[in-house]
Amino acid sequence: MCRLVTDYLDKTVNEYPDKTAFIDFKRVITFQELKDEASAIASAIIDRNVFRKPILLFMDKRVSTVSSFIGIAYSGNFYTPVDIKMPDDRIGKILNILDPAIVITDKEHEEQARTIFAGRDIMVFEDEVSRPVLNDRITDVRSRLTDADTLYVFFTSGSTGIPKGVIISHRAAVDYTDWISDCYGFDEKTVFANQAQLYFDASIQDIYAPLRNGSTTLLIPNRLFASPVRAWKEIIRHKANTLFWVPSVLCLFANFDVLSHVEKAPLKTVLFCGEVMPVKQLNYWIENYPDVIYANLYGPTECTDACTYYTIDRKFKDNEALPIGKPCANTEVYVITEEGALADRPGVTGELYISGKCLSDGYYNDPEKTAKAFLPNPFSSNEAELMYKTGDLVFYNEAGELIYVCRKDYQVKIHGYRVELGEIEAAALSVKGVDYCCCLFDQDNEKTILVYTGEIGEDELNDILKTKLQDYMIPSAYKHRETMLFNNSEKIDRIALRNEYL
Ligand code: AMP
């Protein structure tokens, strides 16, 4: 029985040593090579006497990044990948929370890393990957670990402007990988075309299903999705047959009618997760690939990846909502109304709470935010059991399937990226010359509008925000006002501002 993700690799490497595990633009790695590289990285870390500590990864989406993830896991530590384009200001906030014991980078990003992480222990992948492997010490580390040990911490947007580090254990990652592999029949013939960045939960099966099942993952650089035809050529070239993509990217292919202009791919399974999948665009995919299995998966980073699922088993009209279905194995969901009652009748809307093995162990170094989001589960016979408060409103339809309605708060999805409008507002308020601000979201066009008062000009504010926020968080438009609008409670009047600007 595999308890740690490294146990998966230890098993698979015996079955498929020479089979391709991961492919990027520069190289291909077999399971044996992956194990060797990961073991060398683990040895370098173990040699530094670092155990059960966070390790930050400053690398692009590459095979070597995957080797580093696994190497960190073999060493008994846990990883946090950050975007190499993340502004220093945001990296600084993550460093404050995480305080990593080591930063791993590669030759390409070494110079940049030495500036950003000055004073920290920096390991360069290429310098360590061919060092002798300390097999005995790796075995010793394995004997001390349990599946409750942390595998990774992923940072998501935080409404107060401070990112939140979601802690995920081996247990949660293994449970999810087992479920999705069994549910969708992933095996050694499965070839994933990875779309998500490796610091997002949507990439988890692309990394761990190959380790478990001997599948292959093609790591597609994210810039290629800017021209979908190029991304598709890679899918054809490597005979990828399985997609787990965010709806925004699937929609891109539909909106530009890409599929009828490109060669047919040997697709078997198309899964989507992370935001609402519009039926019109899904129907476009179904028209082009009628024999493929499609499924709508739902889940927040705090529940590892997907925690409910609906495999498309009937036709939907363009204006119908796709169900998010039912809970995955080992997962329980509760729909709780504003009055605190369980909404188990069809049509009654409530907030979705989740419990089960998939649950995160909370936010790293932030007990206060953890206590607000992870609550005692009053429906469990186990008093220690927690449930996660998702902030998503849902209801059951007549068929007992969950239907997603909307968020309760100011968390939005911009082209698949999770963003708290509060984080954009906090960044803007930290800029000299901004007095008040309010970030509005135009759902139809997936655009953010920052309404603000103060003496700073729009262009200058935009330039400063580029140094504080990730590119997808930069407001799409600015509206300067002489005075802010307030409501009767003296709060910024979002409703009036929405009426004026949206
Ligand atoms: P993330 O943590 O980035 O995975 O974002 C989680 C949030 O994305 C959820 O709380 C939902 O608001 C939204 N979400 C995820 N999957 C779906 C889905 N299938 N349909 C609608 N919204 C979704």
Image (cartoon, rainbow, N blue to C red):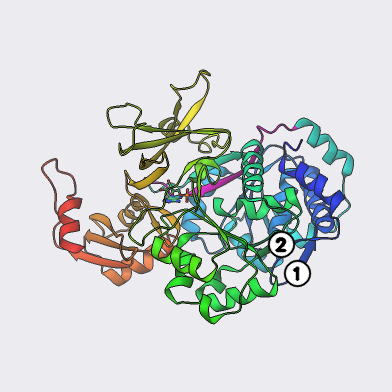
Q: Quadrant of the N terminus?
A: top right
**Which residue in the protein does label 2 denote?**
63
Residue sticking out furthest to the front: 314
* Mark 1: secondary structure: loop
Which sits earlier in the primary sequence, circle 1 or circle 2?
A: 1
**CA separation, marks 1 and 2?**
7 Å
**Which residue in the protein does label 1 denote?**
27
The image position of residue 349, as x and y in percent, is: 31, 38
Q: At label 2, which amino acid type do we have?
A: Val
Q: Is residue 149 magenta?
A: yes
Comparing 344 with 297, the one in front is: 344
- Whether residue 102 appears in this view of the structure is yes
Comparing 271 with 118, the one in front is: 271
Q: Quadrant of the C terminus?
A: bottom left
Q: At label 1, which amino acid type do we have?
A: Arg
- Classify residue 481 as left or right of residue 405: left
The image position of residue 241, as x and y in percent, is: 65, 64
Over which residues does the magenta segment extend? 145-158
- Classify residue 158 as left or right of residue 104: left
* Mark 2: secondary structure: helix
The image position of residue 195, as x and y in percent, is: 57, 63
